[in-house]
Image (cartoon, rainbow, N blue to C red):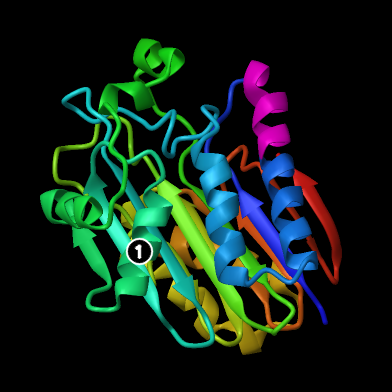
Amino acid sequence: MTIALLCHGGAGEISADRHPPCRQGVRDAGLAGYALLQQGTSALDTVEHVVRLLEDNPQYNAGLGSALNADGQVVTDASIMSGHDRRAGAVGAVSGIANPVSLARAVMDDGRHVLLVGQGAEAFARERGFAFCDPASLIVAHERERWEERHGTVGCVALDTRGHLAAATSTGGVVGKRAGRLGDTPLIGAGNWADEQVAVSCTGQGEAMIRTALAHYTACRHDDFDRLEDLARAAIQHMADHTQGQGGLIAVDHDGQIGFSQNTRQMPVYGIGVNGEIDAL
């Protein structure tokens, strides 16, 4: 059976000294995820695992290394979606959770709700036995020192041996964001989407993705394009035309094609599909 996977480390501008570790981190996570798919692991478990690896890498704005908000605090968002049955889970504005993608997965598996935020999400995490950490432990030195815009969200999309698609996305949000702000990442259809045809993970200026429902828009246009890279390019152009926003997206479809596009200077991506290997920054 065809398998495919693509992951990203966020769209934005990355300083030259950070190009190698940012690119290598995405490559390592992508190869680990592809190996899981080869072993028969589900797309859902695979995207969660890959995003956890990226959350644990301080090079990215998710989990460890998350951006600081206007109050100098770390609050994170994440979502995950299973394509064949449309199950989804998401969390927003959570503090003290090192791997918010797994908390989003727990919300999905619980089945009662799709999105939990703030203290409600944290209470759910305690009920489910999640370990809490000191939020300050998620702040890395260069983020504290710079406190400026960095590349953002991490994500992964995958197709497994059963023909099932899944997508997962996680972020520390925009540097200096107002307390209470949610971007596109925890909003199903804006920053993350999976159905029977395609899985999509978005990154960049979240408000632009929300205003264009970018992930779902991309899925709805799938049948209009023969090549997934052309679909991704058209979706990013649609976002830019309507919002003047900047960002990127990755996608994988039921045929095992992978594709991505961005209108930012960099977006580290790695993946393997029927149309070859993607290893780019």
**Where's the C terminus, which quadrant?**
top right
Residue 2 at least partly seen? yes
Q: Residue at x 53, y 75 (%)?
A: 218
User: Compared with residue 58, is residue 186 higher up or lower down, i.e. above or below?
Assistant: below
Q: Residue furthest front?
A: 129
User: Compared with residue 172, is residue 273 higher up or lower down, i.e. above or below?
Assistant: below
Q: Residue at x 46, y 30 (%)?
A: 150
Q: Residue at x 44, y 76 (%)?
A: 216
Apparent side of residue 18 relative to residue 278 in the rendered image (left or right): left
Apparent side of residue 15 relative to residue 115 in the rendered image (left or right): right
95 drawn magenta: no
Q: Which residues are magenta?
A: 16-25
Please give the residue where the numbered disc 1 appears in the rendered image. Answer: 106
Q: Position of residue 108 (x, y in %)?
A: 35, 71
**Is label 1 in a helix, a strand or a loop?**
helix
Residue 209 at least partly seen? no
User: Compared with residue 222, is residue 89 higher up or lower down, i.e. above or below?
Assistant: above
Between 24 and 228, the one nearer to me in the picture: 24
